[in-house]
Amino acid sequence: MSKADAAAAILWIGATLYAVFGGADFGGGLWDLIAGGAKRGERPRARIQRSLTPVWEANHVWLIFILVVLWTAFPEAFAAIMSTLYVPLALAALGIVLRGAGFAFRKSVDSLPAQRALGACFALSSVMTPFFMGTVVGAVASGNVPAEGNGEAFSSWIEPLPLLTGALFVVSGAYLAAIFLISDSRRAGDGEMEEYFAFRALSAAAAAGALALAGIFMLQADARYVYDGLIAEGLPLVILSGICGLAVLAMLMRGARRGLRPPAALAVAAVIWGWGVAQYPYLLPTSLDIATAAAPGPTLTSVLVVFGVAAIVVLPALGLLYTLSQREIVGESSE
Amino acid sequence: MPLLDALPLAASDSNLLAARELMAFTLGFHIVLACIGVAFPAIILTANYLGLRRGDADAMRLARRWSKVMAVTFAVGAVTGTVLSFEFGLLWPEFMERFGDVFGIAFAIEGIFFFTEAIFLAIYIYGWKRLGGWAHFASGVPMVVTGIGGAFSVVTANAWMNQPQGFTLDAAGKVVDTDPLQVLFNPAWSYEVPHMILAAYMVAGFLVASVYAVGMLRGRLDRHHRLGLLIPLTIACIVTPVQIFVGDVAARGVADHQPAKFAGFECIQETGPNQTEYIGGICTDDGVKGGIGIPGLDSWLVGFSTDTVVTGLEDIAPDERPPANTLLHLSFDTMVGIGFGLLALAGWLAFAWWRRRDIPRTDWFLRAVAVSGVAAIVAVWAGWIVTEVGRQPWIVQGFMRTEEAVTEADGIWFAFAGVMLLYAALGTGLILILRGMARRWREQGEGDEAETPYGPAATSEEASR
């Protein structure tokens, strides 16, 4: 494995962690959005807020990580993506601002109308942000980003496949969020919320599965290179994702409420790695490959070293934060 | 659409101005929150330490409330910082394409610091009740270290733009080799980085103190307010003389490394010894008009002798001179003037403390502290104008012009207008929310049970599940 490949793998690890943890935080916003009126939605919203509060900022940093690794290790790809897909990227950035501010502000105001307005801001942007990020990924996979950059500003992403990818991002975030919220509700001894989110996990799982299947057909039409890779080298990962997804579905229907998180996360992670394997060795299929886009050797070494340090420092710290917040030693109630 | 045609939407030199204004505006907004993020943890931990060590309930209450304030400012800082990461690519794609692999190394390191800061900030802010006192204090210490480390990484990336090194270009101008240590420890880091970290401590210290100064002017003279004023103010006042020294070193560094920038903000037209230092005034091609001139001082400040030759703009190629010299000159003077004003404030406090172990007994002192926070922010903005506008027309000094770096995308002026509206709402919301928190705390008074930290967990049965 070359240093450039290793740097690309780091990028994918970052993307996977962001999709699983950051994605679940976005999904929490979706469930907040459709939880109903102030009275009816009070309990699920409180549950979502408690689960998200201590972790969402740390989870958000994976996005910064992805951006920085991309521009440092593969500057040409970064510039090409940014100069082509600036419309959805700017909208995603707008969503990030509205979501972070809406969430942080909502907790700190006491009037109900202000809480509602800020909550709506948080919840709507939780849908908007992953959607536009998904269109960016879909546009890259479709080969709509030319290596030299400055591609089509609109038709590069306003196409069936990027739009479907956007929807898939939203739905899979909602799916993961519901799965995580089942565990959090169970740990808090809230059986009612456990069932509430179990039902929602089931619906989101069905929707995500349907969108993923539709996506495969669309790949065949619009992103032939990725499709060919997905049914060849990427096939084991596609199958793994399918098995995990079905297993979660079966467990949910049989009333199982434990052990859902690992297969659910794996189902999402396997799709991301399937995509990576399918478009290998390209970063931008089929105009820019990893080796061509890669930074000089010493820069790549720096990125690998930084990742090594992150693995030693950040991951245990992150584990500590998750453990403390799962046990509610760290959390809003003990603020 | 005649109205739209009148707007300069697609022309690329118009893009350059729009992109620069947008970058400056978003950076100016973020830098305030970044300063708070870098330095506020040390202030909070000082109060927390006093609370634990001396059983001081007032100090403990301050630490606790400040950490709730930080939860809000950190969230806004995190998203406005993310916007800047996007803007690097969205506004300056050519810069990122050519040099992302060089100065990105600094940002990769920043990623670790920011990550660690976000994690321990969450543990500290949300761990007041159920972590033991000293364990909770310890969970906050990494925030101080990562704040400084993060500031180093980001500012050294900027220092590299001023003093680029550590890369090899091929004939086509593409980077073919890098030397990460040379990039990180470029000639400008040693004065830019400490200058900014100290500035962060001044902004956070004076800003927090100014809130309590206003409270005391309104007649809230309890110990809570005194301590709330003194803890951050002492830290800021200790830092200020060091900052004046570092700033002086930085100005000489710029005179050495970036003579065009130095000549720009000092309005020096002709190269030579015995240069006059002007305070204030308007820059013209014939020198400064309307300022107070001190003959020879500029040469003396650069080389400790009035014989020191200082480069003038006449020796800089016309297309490599920084624009808007009056703006640069007045920004520099504003920064230095505020720095000395804050030094005087620090001296006043030190004198009163030495004589009477008390803050000066006059409302004028409180009024001075009340404006010191905003003044420190203005000084930081002025300093960044000097650094960034002074580097123009370069984005990477001597290697890439800003006009070569800018995006070809349409609608940057629209984006600028939209971002102005968004950030105006964000800033207003932030201030309203912090004021609302302060009002609730005032109504709550001092002895609220819900605020007692480290007590037996109020909901222990919930925790044991």
Image (cartoon, coloured by chain):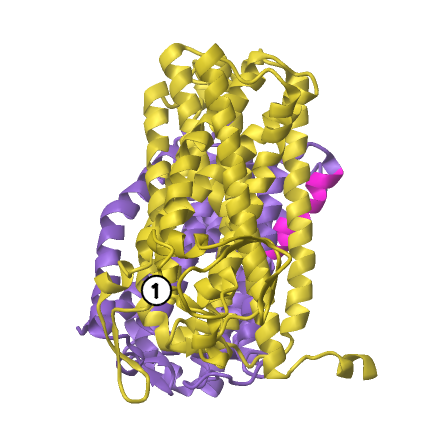
Chain colours: A purple, B yellow
Q: Residue at x 65, y 76 (%)?
A: B411
Question: Which of the two residues, A240 or B29, is positioned nearer the viewer here?
Answer: B29
* Residue bearing the label numbered 1: B257
Determine whether A225 is above or below B137 in the image.
below
Quadrant location, the C terminus of chain B:
top left
Q: Is residue B388 visible?
A: yes
The residue carrying pointer 1 sits among few (fewer than 14), some (14 to 19) or many (20 or more) residues within 10 Å by Cα, namely: some
Q: Residue at x 39, y 53 (%)?
A: B300
Residue B304 in picture, x, y percent from top left: 34, 51
Question: Which of the two residues, B173 or B241, is positioned nearer the viewer here?
Answer: B241
Residue A159 in picture, x, y percent from top left: 57, 81
Q: Secondary structure at mark 1?
A: helix
Q: Chain of mark 1?
A: B
Residue B455 in picture, x, y percent from top left: 44, 14
Q: Quadrant of residue A1?
A: bottom left
Q: Which residues are magenta?
A: A113-125
Q: Residue at x 63, y 14 (%)?
A: B221
Q: Is residue A335 visible?
A: no
Count of number-bearing discs:
1
On screen, residue A323 versus residue B430, left or right, reads left
| Residue B30 on the magenta span | no
Which SS type dominates the magenta stretch?
helix
Q: Amino acid at mark 1?
A: His
Quadrant location, the N terminus of chain B:
bottom right
Q: Residue at x 55, y 28 (%)?
A: B209
Determine whether A257 is above or below A133 in the image.
above
Residue B419 in picture, x, y percent from top left: 64, 61
